[in-house]
Image (spheres, grey):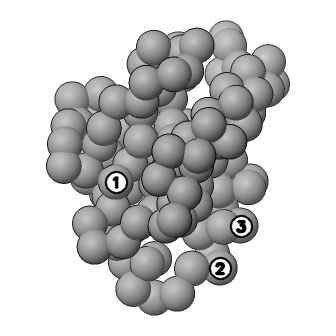
Amino acid sequence: MWEIILTEEVEQWYLALDSDAMNAVTGAINYLEQNGPMARRPVVGEIQGSKYHHMKELIPPGVNIRVLFLFDPQRNAVLLVAGDKTGQWKQWYTDNIPIAEERYENWLQTNGGE
């Protein structure tokens, strides 16, 4: 099993979800936990436009939620940004990829760069 780490922001977002959305996200996280870097579509997709070529997204089934994540040097999946992209199909990535990159860099400086 692979370790999944939620940033504080993602954890707060997750805890505020309604039960249907939480179940969908939990299922996607469980899939990632089981498959790690080998996880693929339809639950995990690759992200274009990040300076980190290995940035990926969780795609929980049945909802328009996305969770951007990266594997740190210890190969933990760090969940960085999450949200519902309904009505913002491309803009959501433009807005959130830079936030995910910054959170990942902060993560590496404080926790994951060993």
Instruction: Pick whichever, 67 or 12, lies toward us.
Output: 67
* Residue at screen point 74% across, 54% down: 8
Q: Amino acid at mark 1?
A: Ile
* Residue at screen point 45% across, 14% down: 53
Cα distance in 3D space between marks 3 and 1: 19 Å
Toward which corner of the image does residue 20 lie, by quadrant? Answer: bottom left
Q: Which residue is mark 2?
A: 16
Which x, y percent locates residue 12?
71, 67
Q: Amino acid at mark 3?
A: Gln
* Residue at screen point 58% across, 13% down: 51
Q: Are marks 2 and 3 in contact (CB under 8 Å)?
A: yes
Up/down of 67 relative to 61, above or below = above
Which x, y percent locates residue 45?
30, 38
* Residue at screen point 29% across, 42% down: 44
Q: Which residue is mark 3?
A: 12
Circle 2 Cα neighbour tier, 10 Å, few/some/many (<14 / 14–19 / ≥20): few
Q: Quadrant of the N terminus?
A: top left
Q: Amino acid at mark 2?
A: Ala
SS class of the residue under badge 3? Answer: helix
Q: Which residue is mark 1?
A: 59
Residue 14 got which mark? none
Q: Earlier in the sequence, mark 3 or mark 1?
A: 3
